[in-house]
Image (cartoon, rainbow, N blue to C red):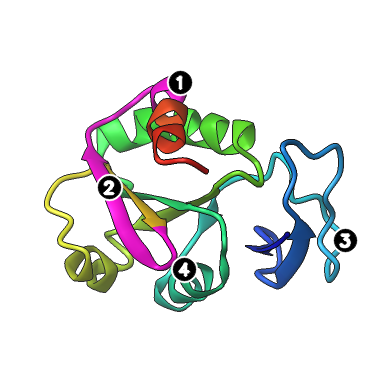
Amino acid sequence: MNLNVVCPHCMKVNRIPKKESYAKANCGHCKQSMLGAKPIAADGGSFSHILANSDLPVVVDFWAPWCGPCRMMAPAFEEAGKALSLKAQFVKVDTEANQQLGGMYGIRSIPTMVLFKGNKEVDRVSGAMSAQQIQSWVMRHGS
């Protein structure tokens, strides 16, 4: 079975075999490794592209630069994203710069993480979490 995965570097869609773990996974377009990549900073267009094209669960951190708890959680979100490389796609949406996305998804407090599967919201959680808590939350919904 193959999965469609959006490259976190160039945003091209790659088809990769579904495996338990990956020793190597480079983008067919830009050739960069898709393992251990930082979360994708998304705007309206790239956000829609990721949701429409990723077969992986998409974990979105809705945050803002002025939010202290958001800034405190950022390293944990990045660490969880690296730990779950090619198990889930990690995305950050700056609600200050992308207010329409925050409004579209009813984001009332930040940080709020929303988990999407197949372009549909599956769960959400508000408040800062540790990397381990984020990983556990994502894995509860099966990656």
| Residue receiving disc 2 | 123
Amino acid type indicated by mark 4: Leu
Nearer the observer: mark 2 or 3; the answer is: 2
**Residue 8 or 115: which is nearer the viewer?**
115
Task: Using a 10 Å C-alpha cutoff, classify the residue at mark 1 as few (fewer than 14 neighbours), some (14 to 19) or many (20 or more).
Answer: some
Question: Which callout, 3 or 1, points at the residue further toward the start of the chain?
Answer: 3
Q: Is residue 138 left or right of residue 38?
A: left
Q: Secondary structure at mark 2?
A: strand
Question: Which callout, 4 or 1, points at the residue further toward the start of the chain?
Answer: 4
| Residue receiving disc 1 | 132
Amino acid type indicated by mark 3: Lys
Q: Secondary structure at mark 3?
A: loop
Amino acid type indicated by mark 2: Asp
Q: CA distance from mark 2 to mark 3?
A: 33 Å
Task: Using a 10 Å C-alpha cutoff, classify the residue at mark 4 as few (fewer than 14 neighbours), some (14 to 19) or many (20 or more).
Answer: many
| Residue receiving disc 3 | 31
| Residue receiving disc 4 | 51
